[in-house]
Amino acid sequence: MSYLDLTIAYGDILPVMADDSSRRAIQNAFSLIFELKLPSEIYASYAFATKLTDAKRSLPKVHLIAKNRRTQYMGSTSAYAAVLAAIQEDIEQLLKTNPGIFSFKTSGQGFVDILDFQTTGVVAFAKGQPFSKVQTGKQTINGHRVQVKQEYLTNSIDSMETLVAHL
């Protein structure tokens, strides 16, 4: 099964970080996948939606938007929170105008917060391990000594369980 088949069969999870480039990236994803607000009509013939329609395939649905890299320092007045709120407002507007592209009815059902994985995520990625296999304590990654704290590992596992529960 190809990525295209998986996307169509299961839909998409769109990760966003608390920055304006993520906001632009998610706007581009909706533009290219669903032909929403294309910058020019010439793009329509190359858009993913056009290719799927031509192949008599249905469009995927967005199942979840993961707010990635959330930290414990992100209070409601932080700049991070402001950018994530703008992304959520964009999605709420799309839910009103194009509800059929989502598998959820409200933005509250479609968003999940994922804590910043920091060192724990770097170790998991560097070792090619899921969080469930990462060991706590001091470790060497590419010649550097790092420490994975149990609290951070637990938070990472809890975040992944939360994400999976939303699916």
Image: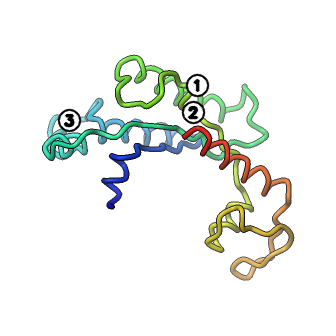
**Residue located at (72% from left, 57% from top):** 118
Q: Which residue is mark 2?
A: 111
Earlier residue among tags 1 and 3: 3
Q: Can you tell which of label 3 and label 2 is closer to the viewer? A: 2
Are discs 1 and 2 less than 8 Å apart at CB?
yes
Could you tell whether 138 is left or right of 85 in the image?
A: right
**Residue located at (59% from left, 32% from top):** 84
Q: Which residue is mark 3?
A: 40
* Residue farthest to the top, as pictured: 96
Are discs 1 and 3 less than 8 Å apart at CB?
no
Looking at the picture, how far across and down is residue 112, in whole percent?
61, 36
Q: Secondary structure at mark 2?
A: strand
Circle 1 crowding by C-alpha within 10 Å: few under 14, some 14–19, many from 20: few
Earlier residue among tags 3 and 2: 3
Q: Which residue is mark 1?
A: 108
* Residue farthest to the bottom, as pictured: 143
The CA distance from mark 1 to mark 2 is 6 Å
Looking at the picture, how far across and down is residue 72, in whole percent?
78, 40
- The disc labelled 2 sits on which kind of residue? Phe
- The disc labelled 3 sits on which kind of residue? Ser
Looking at the picture, how far across and down is residue 2, in whole percent?
32, 60
Q: Which image quadrant: the N terminus?
A: bottom left
- The disc labelled 1 sits on which kind of residue? Gly
Figure check: 122 above or below 19: below
**Residue located at (16% from left, 35% from top):** 41
The CA distance from mark 1 to mark 3 is 32 Å
Looking at the picture, how far across and down is residue 45, in whole percent?
14, 43
Q: Count the marks.
A: 3
Circle 3 crowding by C-alpha within 10 Å: few under 14, some 14–19, many from 20: few
